[in-house]
Image (spheres, rainbow, N blue to C red):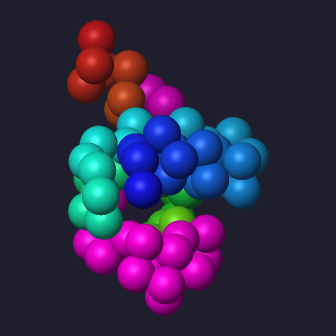
C-alpha cells in the first residue's frame, strides 16, 4: 500500500480533512489537518480515522499507524 492511497482514502471519507501520509508498505505516519477532528478528544479523533482504515488493518494491508492531529491554524503555524 502506498501513502498516497491511504491519504486519498481518508480525505475522501472525511470531508474537510487534509492528510499528509508518510511511509510505505504497511507502516504509516499520518498528519491529519481538520478543525472538526482537532476539536474532538484524542480517542474520538483516532476512532474517526480507524473507522476508515479498519478494513485495511483487518486484511493486513496496514500494520501500524501513528497519527498527529492539527487544526488548520496549528498546521499553518507549524509549517509556516
Query: Whole-percent x and y of residue 3?
Result: 40, 45
* The one of 31 and 7 positioned closer to us in this rendering: 7
- Residue stretch in magenta: 51-73
Q: Relative to residue 43, is residue 49 depicted above or below?
A: above
**Residue at x 25% of width, y 62% of height:** 27
| Position of residue 64 in the picture relative to residue 4 (left or right) | left
Looking at the figure, which quarter contains the N terminus? bottom left
Query: Whole-percent x and y of residue 4?
Result: 48, 39
**Residue 55 shows up from this direction:** yes
**Residue at x 40% of width, y 37% of height:** 20
**Residue 31 shows up from this direction:** no
| Position of residue 1 in the picture relative to residue 44 (left or right) | left
Query: Whole-percent x and y of residue 11?
Result: 63, 45
Q: Single out the residue that lies furthest toward the bottom.
A: 58
Q: Does residue 25 belong to the magenta stretch?
A: no
Looking at the figure, which quarter contains the C terminus? top left
Amino acid at each position: 500500500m502506498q501513502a498516497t492511497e491511504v491519504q486519498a482514502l481518508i480525505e475522501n471519507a472525511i470531508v474537510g480533512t487534509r492528510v499528509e501520509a508518510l511511509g510505505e508498505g504497511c507502516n504509516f505516519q499520518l498528519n491529519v489537518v481538520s478543525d472538526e477532528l482537532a476539536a474532538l478528544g484524542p480517542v474520538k479523533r483516532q476512532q474517526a480515522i480507524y473507522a476508515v482504515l479498519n478494513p485495511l488493518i483487518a486484511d493486513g494491508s496496514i500494520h501500524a499507524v501513528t497519527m498527529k492531529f492539527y487544526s488548520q491554524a496549528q498546521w499553518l503555524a507549524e509549517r509556516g
